[in-house]
Every structure is written in structure tokens, then in C-alpha cells.
Amino acid sequence: MNTQFWVIQAFNGISYGALLFLVGSGLSLIFGVMRIVNLSHGAYFLWGGYIALSVIAATGSWALSLPVAALAVAAIGIAMERLFLRSEGFAILRNVVIALSVGILVALAVSARWNDFIGAGWTRFGLVTAGAAVVAYLLLSRISLVPIENDVLRQVLLTVGFAFLFQQAALDIWGGNNMDITPAAELSTSVVVGGIYFPLYRVFMIAMALTIGIALWLVMEKTRMGAAVRATVDDAQMARGVGIDTNRISMLIFALGAFLAALGGVIGGAFLGIYPGLDFEMLPLAFAVVIIGGMGSLGGAAIGALVVGLADNFGKALFPEVSYFTLYAPMVLILAVKPTGLFGRE
Amino acid sequence: MVSQQAKVLIVAAALLAFAYIVPHSGSFVILLATRAMAFAILAMSVDLLLGYTGLSSMGQAAYFGVGAYLTAILATKMHFGLGWDFWLVVVLGILIGAALAAFFGLFAIRASGVYFLMITLALGQCVWGLAYRWNSLTGGDNGINISARPNFGIDLSNEVTFFYLAFAFFAVSMALMYLLVRSPFGRSLAGIRERELRMQILGYNTWLHKYIIFIVAGGFGGLAGVLWAHTNGHVSPETLVLTTSVDALLMVVLGGAGTLVGAVIGAGIVFGLREYLSTLVPWWQYALGGVYVLTILYLPSGLMGIPARIRQRLATPGKNDVSTELKTKQLASEPS
């Protein structure tokens, strides 16, 4: 337990906090702007990592995998937000998507039960899918959707449902093995400061989070767009009243949140690994970040990420048996004393 | 409309039929039904909070977990609870669930809405973290195997016998919860769900009401955990992960919040998807996720709400949904 131990643990904690900032800041902004508790955020993290693996396998370029994975997941996020998280618009497209999925599920079930009926060909499979989809579509179009805005519990369950779907899809696409993202070779060295080795990759993580954090802060504080976002966080109804297009802002923020989570997945995949179940491991940590910092606050997310990163690292090093407890107990206390978090506005 | 007595009779008859049919089926069905009943007790306890009081707790697996871990630790470390003292373990399991809820409730009940959801999530994660990391007590990631079931003259290692025992606990729990929600206390809970401020103005101590029902739900959760530990024979952190709590919530919403029968049906369906469908097909999670999405988008009042929706639709052709009614309800519940 000398200085070296403390320095290394603090450094590891801060770099882990940098990763958590990427995941938590998006979650926090999504909650602040849309009042949606997004439980598929962990799935975005996981998918970011997996897509990056595919990009690396195809092109061999780690640097390319960062933007590609993040943008792809952002697109998934936009689709999910437009189609399912708001009730207005896209009703027909939503019904078509759901009906098709139901159709495929029915066809899968039929082929699992009566193997000889479907056989090897895809024609019958397609026919069953189409038939079931049409029936499902006709049924769905007769039932109108019950809006999920303002109903936290239903948003939670809906996003959990999507998290399960993403989890299964990831399992089907990339398999169940534990995989590792290998970053660019230049980053796998260490820098020596005062006789202590600091892995360059962790330095890169901190730099990345700092850059993104500062960029986000600048956009939020200095641009008209950022002002509109802040206004929406503070009072969405009033923001709409003064002519801010909160609908568009919701979409942008949701995409941004998914983008950041996926970026975190690519970056974190290099030292956490990418494996099934990682999504539901990251999710409570991201919530701890958001809760401690305060929902909807960027600075809060930064402080929260730092606190959680350090608490997690020192907890595991000093009191391994109660390490997760030392992480979530402060979350409970903060919620009990100041529900809006340390830096939340209400 | 069916009268209340008739409904009770229908449920009782269905339960008796269930208790008669299941033991005559295969051993896998008996095992599944026994486990599903443990989850049904948990789901009903969640319904006490969500359906009858309007508290959406995301940490109900914690009480389930402490009941299960208590049973497993006593059985393996102290050889306690494998004979007549099994009944003592049942009482202890209920007490530890209730005691934990009494402690957690001090933090949670103050919060409301999304903050209640978050604080119960955090509390649940605290318990999960202890189970996952406290190796010397809980066996960490590997969990604890319980080698034997209790034997007190009646040998519970027989699956059919254990099924009847679990059924008895399940039926008694359901009856007790039914009496509770029909009591004046249960009525004032419904009042709190509809409009807490008005209940406060009428002089009700709403905090105490919510606190008491939180403790009761914790006690039933503990009981479900004791049953789960013995029917599963294995307790691990998987028992009390976040998804178990969320599953319990879905069971209630899928069946229809505010109806105990709905919670039971929902428990049967969700548990069946997780434990039965997963043995049949590798893509079972699509079905589970699909049930989540479809329930939330199209069936917010649950399966038990379908008759009412159909009736309403037949009564007012053209205006085809409950959404307008729900919207006004939502508006009414917003504090003005």
C-alpha cells in the first residue's frame, strides 16, 4: 500500500471513469431531454463493440471501426426512437415492422415444431412469414397504440424488451464467445512517469473522454442548438411554447446518446472484452453515473463517472467482498437525500 | 359482468383443476409448475405495489434473493431447515424479506415516480453486489448448491409432494393478498394510487400506508425465495439480477396490473418463455422481447383488461380504444 499503489489505482479509476462518462452522459442527456429511462443503453454499448469487431475483421483498421460502429448504432437508436418511443407518426411503418417480426417468429416456431413442413427451402418459410405478417398487420392496425409518453414504467419495460431483442440478435450474429478488440499497435505501449508504468491506451481513453466532454460542453453552452437542448431539459413544454422543435431535439439527443454508448463499447471492448451479458453489466453502472451526477446534466455525468470509476476501482482493490455495495450504496443515499442528483436541476 | 363471488369461485375452481392436472403430467411439467408458483408469489407481491398502490419497484428480486440465500446458507452451513425446522426457515424467510423491505423502505418510500424506480433499482443492485462478491458467505458467482430438500416425516424430495407444498403456499398467499387488497387498508392503497394528494388531505398517512405495503410485499418476496431455493436446488447471483426484477414487473403488466389473477397468469407466461421455450428453441429471447414490446405498445391494461377493451369497443364503435380514457386518467394524476 505505497504511493505507487494509490497512483496506479487512481489512474485506473479515472480511466474507467472516462469510459463510464461516454456511456453515462448519453443516458443522462436522453433522460433530461425526453424523460425516457432507456434500458437498452447497455445494448448500444455491446453492439458498438460487436460492430467494431466486424469492421476490424473486414478492414483490419481499428481507427475506422470507431466512427463506423458509433454511427451504425446511432442509426439504430434513431430508428428505435422514431418508431417505438413516440406514438405520433410512422404508425404504418411501425405496424409493418412489428407485423414482419411477428411473421418471422411464427415461421421460426412452425419450422421448429414441424421440421418437415418447412423443409430446407426458403419458399415455404417465406410464405408462412408473409401469411402471419399480413394477419398480424391487419390485427395491429385495428388496435390503436396507447401512448407511452409520461409513463415511466412502460418506457422502462419497452426498452428492456428491446434490450433482450438486441441481446439475442447479437448472440445470433456474433456468437457467444468472449471476444477482444485489439486497438492500434501504437496504443499498446506504456509511458513511464516517475518509475510507474501507465498503459498508453488508458491515457488515450482519458484524452478521448476529455475531448468529447469539452466538445459537448462547448456545443451545449455556446451554440444556439445547445441552448435549445438546455431549454428542453429544463422545461420541454415551455421550450415548445417558444418555438423550439423539441421533437427534432429528442431525435438528435437520442442518436447522440446511442453514438456515445457505442463509442464507449468500442473503446471499452479493448480491456473489458465483448461478451453476451456485458450489456446488463454496464447498464446499472451507467445508471449509477447518471443518478450520482443528476439526470440531464453534462457536468454531473462527468463528476458521476469519476466517482463511480474511482469507487469501483478502489472498492475492488480495498474491500473486494463488498465492492459493488460500496458503489450502489452511495447511489441510494444520494437518491434518498437529493433525488435530483448532485448536479441535477429541477 | 360477473359478480365478485362468481369470480372467486372461478379462480378457486381453476386452482383446483391446476392442482389436479399438474401432478398427473410429466416430471418436467411438475418441476416447471412448482418453480412458476414461486415466481407467481413474487409477481403478486409486485402487484401489491404496482397494481394496488402505484409504486413501480425495480428491485423486488432483492427480497426474493435474501429469502433464497437465507434458506441456502442455513441449509448448507448449519444444516438447519432440513427437518421440522423447515417451517422455521419459512418464517425466517418471510421475516428477513420484510425486515429488508422495512430498512430499504426508509430510503425508497420518500421518493416517487422515476426516482422511486431508480432508488429501488439501486437498492436491488446493492443486494446483488453483496451476493456476487461476498464469496465467503454467498459463494460468489458460483452460488450455493442445496444438496437435500427438507424431510419431516413428509419427504419433500419427492417432486409431487413438493409441488403440493408449494401449491399450498401459493394458494394461501393468494388468498391472503386478496383479503388484504379488499380490506379497508387495501382500499386506501387504491386511493393513494389514484390521487395521493387527495388522500393526504383526507387525513390519511400515505407514507405509512406505502411503507406497510412495501414491507408486506418484501415478506411475500422472501417467502417466494425460500420456495425457489428448494425447488431450484441452487441459488446464485443470477437469482437476483436486475432482469429478475424487471421480469416480475412485466409479469404484472402483462397479466393486468391491479388483478392478482393477472399477475399469476403473467408469471406463468413469462416464466414459461424463460424456462420452457428456452429448452425448445435457441431464439427464445426474441419471443420474450416480443412479448415485452407488444404488451407495452398494444396491451397496457394487460390480458385481464382485454374483455373490458372489447366491451368498450363494442359499446362505442368508431372510438375504438381505451387510449383516450387512459390519457384523461394520466392528466388527472398529474399534480396540478
Image (cartoon, rainbow, N blue to C red):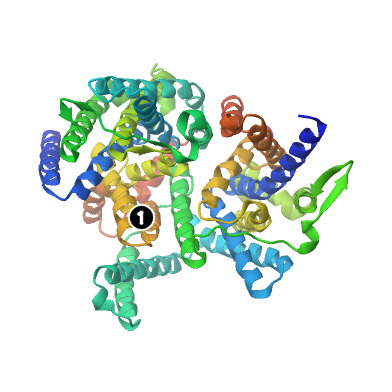
Among the 4 quarters of the image, the one containing residue A110: bottom left
Name the residue nearer the viewer: B331 or B42. B42
User: Would you say A174 lies left or right of B183 here?
Assistant: right
Q: Secondary structure at mark 1?
A: helix
Q: Which residue is mark 1?
A: B291
User: Would you say B92 lies left or right of A59 here?
Assistant: left
Among the 4 quarters of the image, the one containing residue B233: top left
User: Would you say A48 lies left or right of B73 here?
Assistant: right
In the rendered image, is residue B113 in sight? Answer: no
Q: Residue furthest right?
A: A194
Task: Give the percent coordinates (x, y) of residue B153.
Answer: 15, 25
Task: Give the percent coordinates (x, y) of residue A199.
Answer: 78, 50
Amino acid at pointer 1: Val
In the rendered image, is residue B141 in sight? Answer: yes
Name the residue nearer the viewer: A243 or B126. B126
Task: Give the percent coordinates (x, y) of residue A269.
Answer: 64, 56
Name the residue nearer the viewer: B209 or A114. A114
Is B199 situated above or below A323? Answer: above
Q: Quadrant of the N terminus of chain B?
A: top left
Q: Residue at x 36, y 70 (%)?
A: A104
Name the residue nearer the viewer: B95 or A235. B95
Task: Give the percent coordinates (x, y) of residue B166.
Answer: 22, 34
Which chain does the numbered disc 1 sit on? B
